[in-house]
Image (cartoon, grey):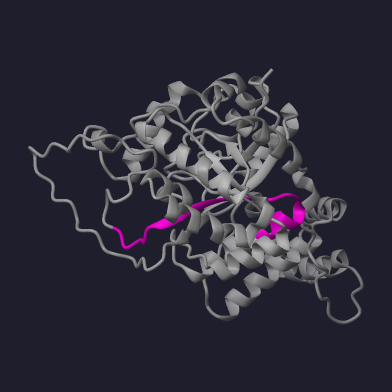
Amino acid sequence: MARYAELHCHTNFSFLDGASHPAELVYRAAELGYESLAVTDHDGFRGVVKMHAASVEIGLPIVYGTEIGLPRPGEEPTPQPKRKRHPKDIPFRRRGRNKRMHGSKPTTRALTDHLVLLAPDPDGYVAISRLVTQGQFNGKKDEPRYTFSDLESAARHGNLVALTGCHNGAVPRAAQRGDIVGALQAARLLKDIFDDRLHIELSHHGMPEDDVRNEVLADVALRLGIPTVATNNVHYGYRSEARIADVVAAISGRRNLDEADGYRSASDLRYLRSPQEMAAQFERYPGAVARAADLGRDLAFDLTLIAPELPDFPMPGAFTTEDEYLRHLVMDGAKEVYPGLNGGIAPNALERMEHELGVIEELGFAGFFLVAWDIVRFARSKNIYCQIRGSGADSAICRCI
């Protein structure tokens, strides 16, 4: 019986790219009998919490990762001209793309080489988080900029596993052109960074160029001794949801569906396919599907292992606990917010605050409220406007501090 784990999967937290909610993907993967499922949204871990919650409910192991874009050698951002609209303008119909409609709206974004990173354990998760954070700092809104130096550091410290990515990756891009020399060069560069943790990713969405690309990729893998793994570069859970992906792509390109017709993917195969389908698709590449299952099994871990704990809040004077200091701040502020008789506090407000403080102490959240108070205090000192969001907006103690 075929075994499989999907190692390249985008949720709807890959905004305007993925079309399915993380929970839907988890339920479908479990229904298909997957060994595990990876979440590899673009440039971050936005979908992992929902994915983890669903995995706990259903019992499916999850692999945590992301897909980043590395700068291409000599590539600089180039503004693309705005597209002039005309009532009779009919989009040029061509073979669709397997990705978002890059170039369909004015942009200064440089083209990048995609790379999938997978965390083998909590340390790897931290390493990816730091890499993405640094990339966001280096770039600008929606355009993180990664460096090979930062990637090498993250790979070393986090023992990261890498897949060569979709057709937009450096290795498969060269392979799709039939450029074996370029593909080998790009693969050697990644192998120098990841060593035996690099895997050549094979995917097939029924396009003629997929056969050419995979043949060259398999040749690269054989020459360099790099294992291959099969993926489906998933963007939705069910085949029937390909239409939703088309709508998402049109929104991304700021076009209606008629205008986007020539840009939509020509394939509706980027869904969670059964292990049997994947085994049949990659029959000519022995071991690629089974290796995906093995890798997915080995890389999955419990996300609760990395639940962060706040450091102790620095307290002044004779205060010894965070709960004690928070109570002092609350009661001091309550005299102005909820004034009572003789400079005291209104009884009904005091009763509510005692209840809230009790809940906070029971849950160990005093440090969180002190951090929020410290941020608001700083903002007020600099005349920076701020407001509360979430359930804390109805808290009596928040009004007091």
Rendered position, 392 above or below 270: below
Looking at the picture, does residue 319 appear above or below residue 323? Answer: below
In the picture, which quadrant includes the N terminus? top right
Q: Quick check: is 108 in the magenta stretch?
A: yes
Residue in front for this viewpoint, 392 or 206: 206
Q: Residue at x 58, y 61 (%)?
A: 132
- Magenta span includes 278: no
In the rendered view of the protein, which quadrant contains the C terminus?
bottom right
With 343 as the anchor, is 232 left or right in this view? Answer: left
Residue at left offset 42%, top offset 57%: 112
Q: Is residue 236 visible?
A: yes
200 sits to left or right of 113: right
Residue 390, horizontal then vertical, whole percent: 62, 50
> Could you say which is closer to the camera, residue 151 or residue 239?
151
Instruction: Using residue 251 as the reference point, say whether residue 201 is left or right of it.
Output: right
Residue found 44% across the figure and 58% down from its top: 142
- Which range is magenta? 107-128
Residue at 44% in and 21% down: 240
**What percent of the width, then of the height, locates residue 8?**
56, 40
Q: Residue furthest front?
A: 223
Residue 396 visible in this rendered orientation of the protein: no
